[in-house]
Amino acid sequence: MPDHRSLIDQRIAAWAKALPSDGLYAPMAYLMGLPAKRIRPLLVLMACELFGGKPEDALDEALGIELFHNFTLMHDDIMDAAPLRRGQPTVHAKWNVNTAILSGDAMLVKAYQLMARRPAVAAIFSEHALGVCEGQQLDMDFEQREHVSVADYREMIRLKTAVLVSGALRIGATIAGAATDDVRLIGAFGEHLGLAFQLRDDLLDAFGDPTKTGKQQGGDLLAGKKTFLLIRGLELSAEQGRDALPAELAKPSARRDVPRMLAELETLGVRHEAERAVQREEQQAAASLDAIAVDEARKASLRTLSAQLMGRSY
């Protein structure tokens, strides 16, 4: 993994250095230079190597995936009116909204230029990139909907988060010439890994250590964000005639009692349900990787990365 990370960092640095320094491109270089895990480009290289390809052969596509991911972040920050990204000013805060919109659009074009060398890769990328946009629209729709089910929420995070993880792996496998069934299996591994990642993120927001997560504990609850925890908590509250959660949500966000809400989620068994949901996704991810008929040693880096993601505390 360190070698993969080094390859990606060098490719991103060279790409950013070659950009013009004007107002359209400077925000791209700025955003790509912020600290990041680089999970998606790492997965492109790992999947390529898994099926016998050279990581260096997939570097353009790895960069393309990371450019697309950062394009979505640039625009998401505008929609969320977020002032910070990874502890630094967001692009629209540092420049302005119009610059962030246009620079994001150009970043998307740059991503497509990198994906266009191989038609099969371009097709996979287009399918998964559109899914991300569909997921973001669902997320916004949920803010206006009174009722959102757990199934609705799972589909939203599948599209918004998991499909790009799946797409990164499918692209790496395709570059290496993997068989169709193997491309499907590695994609399934990524989708379940992405779902587990997001569900764990929900748990960490509520129950994680703020000194490790760097976030206010229960920030999603304060905002009334429809995550697995709140959706399921409200369902169980209605079934059992309990009013602690609805009573807190009826208050202005700044006055909500987060410790009371967390205690109620514990009492209702929602935290345990969420942890079990994470485990189910992790098990399905592992089963998909197990089913791929390649030497176990080649799977080592993917197993290590997935274990790190599954065991994270921030």
Image (cartoon, rainbow, N blue to C red):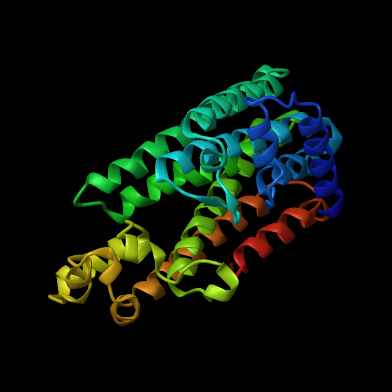
The residue positioned 66% from the left and 17% from the top of the image is 119
Seen from the viewer's position, the closer of residues 221 and 228 is: 221
Of all residues, the one furthest to the left in this rendering is 241
Q: Position of residue 181 (x, y in %)?
A: 63, 36
Numbered disc total: 0
Q: Relative to 53, say whether 147 is above or below.
A: below
The residue positioned 15% from the left and 68% from the top of the image is 238
Q: Position of residue 128 (x, y in %)?
A: 53, 32
The residue positioned 22% from the left and 71% from the top of the image is 248
213 left or right of 56 in image: left
130 left or right of 175 in image: left
Seen from the viewer's position, the closer of residues 257 and 229 is: 257
Seen from the viewer's position, the closer of residues 235 and 79 is: 79
Q: Relative to 308, say whether 291 is above or below.
A: above
141 left or right of 57 in image: left
Q: Position of residue 56 (x, y in %)?
A: 86, 35
Q: Quadrant of residue 58?
A: top right
Q: Quadrant of residue 211?
A: bottom right
The residue positioned 30% from the left and 60% from the top of the image is 224
Q: Position of residue 9 (x, y in %)?
A: 80, 44
